[in-house]
Image (spheres, rainbow, N blue to C red):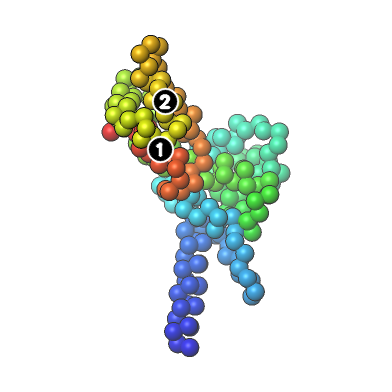
Amino acid sequence: MAFNAKLASAISAGTVGAAGSAYAGMKVLNSPKEKRETVGDKYKGTLITSGSEDTEKWGTRKSKLEKDESADMEASLKSVKSKQSLQADDIKAWCSGVASSPFDSKSTKIKWFESYCVYTIKEKVGKFITDNQSSSWTKANDALKNKGKTNLPSHLQGVYDQLTALQSSDASALQKYCHSKQDDVFRGLDDSLYSEIATYCIQS
C-alpha cells in the first residue's frame, strides 16, 4: 500500500508539473473516472512558453494576427483579434484556454492553435539560414552534395539533382526548399522534417 501511495503521488506531481510548464495559468482537467487528453498534452514540448525567452515570439504572433484577414478564422480567436488594443498577452491567454481544453482532432481551433501557439520549425532550429544570397548557402549546399543522393530523403534527392545538374544547375535550390518549410509547425525533436531542416538548413 505504501508503494502504491508513493507511486500515485509521483504520477500526480509529474502531471501537474508538465501541464504548468507551457503557459502560466493553464488548468489541469481532472476527472474522477478518467483524465482526458488536453490540447496541451497533445502538443507537449512544442508550445511557445510564457517565459521571457519567448516574449519576442508572442510579439511576432501579435503582428501576425493583426495582419491575418482569413475569412475562416475560428470565432474565439477572431474575437481576440477584434480587441481595440490587442496585446501579445491576449493571444497567450487564448492559447492557454485552448491548451486546457480536451483535445478533439475535429475541432476548428486546432488549425489556429498550431498557427499561433506552437513554435515554427525555424524558431526551434536556431541557426537557420535566413539570408537569400546564394553565397550564404555555399557550405550548406556542399554538405548536402557530400552526403550523396542515395543517403538523402526522397524530396531532398530532388534538391540534390538541381544542385548538381551539369546544365542549368540551381544554386538556390536548397535555400528555396528550406525557406518553403521554415514556417511549418514544429512537431517535436523527433519529427523527420525538423531533423532535415536542422541538418541541412543551418549555418555551419
Find out whether the residues at labels 2 and 1 contact each other: C-beta distance under 8 Å.
no
In the displayed orientation, state which residue is furthest to the top: 167
Q: Residues within 10 Å of mark 1 (few under 14, many from 20)?
A: some
Could you say which is closer to the camera, residue 128 or residue 155?
155
Above or below, 169 relative to 63: above
Residue 159 badge: 2
Could you say which is closer to the camera, residue 68 or residue 129?
129
Which residue appears at 43% of the width and 48% of the height? Answer: 190
Mark 1, residue position: 196
| Disc on the earlier residue, 2 or 1 | 2
The spot of residue 84 in percent (x, y) is 65, 39
Image quadrant where residue 137 sits: top left
The spot of residue 90 in percent (x, y) is 59, 47
95 vs 21, left or right, is right
Determine if residue 59 is in view: no
Which residue appears at 59% of the width and 55% of the height? Answer: 39
Assign a secondary structure to mark 1.
helix
Above or below, 175 relative to 121: above
Which residue appears at 49% of the width and 46% of the height? Answer: 187
118 vs 150, left or right, is right
What amino acid does circle 2 point to? Val
Above or below, 91 relative to 9: above
In the displayed orientation, state which residue is furthest to the bottom: 1
Determine if residue 94 is in view: yes
Between the residue at mark 2 and the residue at mark 1, the CA separation in whole angstroms equals 13 Å
What amino acid does circle 1 point to? Glu
Could you say which is closer to the camera, residue 108 or residue 195?
195
Q: Residues within 10 Å of mark 2 (few under 14, many from 20)?
A: many
Which residue appears at 61% of the width and 40% of the height? Answer: 85
Assign a secondary structure to mark 2.
helix
